[in-house]
Structures are given as structure tokens and as C-alpha cells.
Image (tube, helix red, strand yellow):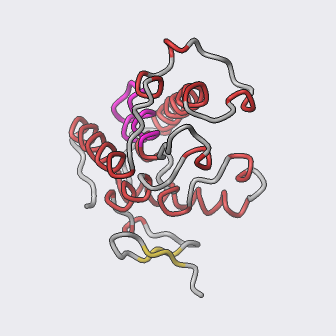
Amino acid sequence: MKPELVTNSGRIINILNPNPEDFCLNDIAFGLSRQLRYNGMTVLPYTVAQHSVIVSKLCISPKAQIVAMLHDASEAYLHDLPTPLKTILPDYCNIETRFQDAIMEGILGGGFYETLKEAEEIDAEVKAADRTALVHEVNSIVLHPEAYGLEKLPEILVIQDLRERRIQTVDGALAYYRKHFTAVEQALNLQHTA
């Protein structure tokens, strides 16, 4: 069996050597809207697509906002593995990194960052927003949040969509992801592959 994946649009992607030209936003949005965060152990099914939008909205810089939309894009193809499992699978982590790099190049283009410093600053902003989203998610929608050992937030401080459990259905998450990506993309005057 060849190490290949077939996407929703019918594209064939080599798992060991992903080509940036093989990735498109529609496949990413479709895949992320069907991947559940926390291995599905939440009060309602909560998708990686909705998580990505929340992380993007927590970012200030428009470039960080669009990078946040793609920060888990490899999971559209490789699945959202729980972090403790990833830490013991170095081969998976290497494949995931190759996918992320190819996706970023394929969707945003090669010259997205003007400097290495800018890339580092955007990466730090997205990681901080991702961590903030994690804390809010664990405090509001994860089953057995005490097991995560994170700080407890007063309910009023939890992100409104999570506090009010406005969790998107699969189709809702797909539309939500596409709409937000388009809005951020337009703010940056970017174009992506369909």
C-alpha cells in the first residue's frame, strides 16, 4: 500500500513527502470540521475547525489571525491526536511538521513572512492564543477538567461561545471556518487555492 491519503476533493497526498500544491482550503475546512478536539471527550462534539476560529479571534495581528486558522491544519489529514500520545510518537510528529510546513506554503505562499523575527513573533502570538483557548475550553466544555491541572477561571471570564455552549455542528463548523478564513484573508488581501 502506498503511503498516500485521498482528500475530500480527490487530491492524492503523499504522507512522507507532501507537496504544497496538493493542499487546498476546502479540504482543510472539510477535514477540520470533522475532527473532534479532546478525543471527543467534551460535553458536546467540539471541532478543530471551531477551535481554530476561536484561536484566530484571540490573535491581534491579522497575519497571526490567518496563521491561527491553519495552526492545526495538518489534523484535517492526519487526525487530532491527544498531545500525550503525540509526545511518544516522534515519527508522527515529524510527519505532522512536514504537513504543516507544506500547508503553510501551499495556502499562504512562500514569502508570507517578511523576516525571521516576524515569523517568530507571529508564532509566539498564535501559541499564546492557542494556550488561552485551551484554558477556556477545559474550563467550560471538557469532561473532567480537573484532570488537566489548569487554572480555574470564573465562569464569567470564559469565552462567551464556550460558556454559552454555542458549539457548532459539523456543517456549522465548516461554514464558520470558511467564513472567518475569508474575512481574515480579505483583510490581508490574500488569495488561496480553492
Residue at 58% of width from left, 53% of height from top? 80
* Residue 188 picture location, percent across and down: 25, 38
Residue 94: within the magenta? no
Of the 4 image quadrants, the one containing the N terminus is bottom right
What quarter of the picture does the C terminus occupy? bottom left
Q: Is residue 74 left or right of residue 91?
A: left
Judge whether 68 appears above or below 74 on screen. Answer: above
Query: Would residue 124 be found to the left or right of residue 62 on screen?
Result: right
Above or below 129: residue 4: below
Residue 45: x and y in percent read 50, 45
Residue 161 lies, in percent from the top left, at 41, 27
Snapshot quadrant of residue 27: bottom left
Quarter-of-image position of residue 160: top left
The residue closer to the viewer here, 66 or 174, is 174
Whole-percent x, y for residue 185 in the image: 26, 42
In front of the other: 4 or 141: 141
Q: Residue furthest front?
A: 43
- Taking the view exactly as shown, the residue that stands out farthest to the right is 88
Q: Main secondary structure of the magenta part?
A: helix
Q: Is residue 53 left or right of residue 132?
A: left
Using residue 88 as the reference point, say whether residue 182 is left or right of it. Answer: left
The residue at 67%/62% (across/down) is: 92
Q: Magenta stretch: residue 61 in it? A: yes
Q: Is residue 103 above or below residue 169?
A: below
Q: Which residue is rendered at x = 37% and y = 58% of the image?
A: 30
Task: Read off the magenta span.
Answer: 50-67
Q: Toward the viewer: 110 or 15?
A: 15
**Vertical placement of 140 versus 181: above or below?**
above
